[in-house]
Image (cartoon, helix red, strand yellow):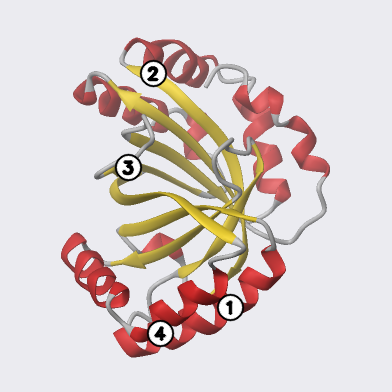
Amino acid sequence: MKNFFLALFFLCTISLKAQYCLFFDFKAENKEMVVSTITAAMNTDWAKNIQGTKSLFAYLPNGSTESTHSIQFCFPNEEAFENAFMSYGQSMDARLLLDERLREYAIDVSQSINTPIWYNGQDWAEDNVFMLYQMEVTNPSAYLKEFKSFSQKMAKKLEFEKNSYGIAFPIVGKNADFSHFVWIGSPDIKTALSKTKKMYSDPLFAEFSSKVSGIRKVVNTVMSVRVMDF
């Protein structure tokens, strides 16, 4: 995570009214010490003053990625991000824990800042399990049109209208393998698995897949489980 906030300084100049979520994906080699170190970092004055959500997620399973976990900070606007960036550089405690000590127990895999293109308006902070579909999309506008139509019909049919779902992309730190990702939130693992199984066997899914087959390629699927919020 070292120097990550410095590398993203220019983001503060972007004028978009949307949420920004920083994903710090890593491979945990000592899970207990990782959780302990992150918890200590989240108890610093820097973390307590962040205007946004702070969460630790586990990838179960992690598909084709090396990452086993993800620390995620989600900000409501550019000002909140900027405040976190500026104060991070001044917090010796946070920097010691996240830049130095965490490296003893985890291997950094990827860092990105993501923003939603479209979602159904539900707060993803209320969901505990997410099915993530990482894709390479060659025609985002056409894909978005089809996805909006399909996802709203499927949400009504499978009764996950009150959960969050949508499509996002990394605007900084683009992954070499995918350009966009879809998320579908659930309250727990059993609900996520049950509804995913039903979705895959539904005729609406087959129809949607056929329509977008020429403009998107799914490169990885991941179940992301909320471990704790700070």
Q: In the image, which disc is placed on residue 161?
A: none
Q: Tag 3: residue type? A: Gly
Give the residue pinned by disc 1.
146
Q: Are marks 2 and 3 in contact (CB under 8 Å)?
A: no
Q: Residues within 10 Å of mark 1 (few under 14, many from 20)?
A: some
Q: Nearer the viewer, mark 2 or mark 3?
A: 3
Q: Residues within 10 Å of mark 2 (few under 14, many from 20)?
A: some
Indicate the quadrant where residue 83 lies: top right
Spatial CA span between label 4 and label 2: 40 Å
Q: Are marks 4 and 2 in contact (CB under 8 Å)?
A: no
- Above or below residue 87? Residue 22 is below
Tally of numbered discs:
4
Give the residue pinned by disc 3.
63
Spatial CA span between label 1 and label 2: 38 Å
**Local SS, label 3:** loop
- Above or below residue 149? Residue 38 is above
Q: Residue at x 55, y 76 (%)?
A: 211
Q: Tag 2: residue type? A: Ile
**Local SS, label 2:** strand
Dot 4 or dot 2: first in sequence order is 2
Give the residue pinned by disc 2.
107
Dot 3 or dot 1: first in sequence order is 3
- Give the x, y percent position of residue 183: 44, 61
Dot 1 or dot 2: first in sequence order is 2
Q: Residues within 10 Å of mark 3 (few under 14, many from 20)?
A: some
| 77 sits to left or right of 75 | right
Q: Residue at x 70, y 31 (%)?
A: 8
Q: Residue at x 34, y 25 (%)?
A: 27
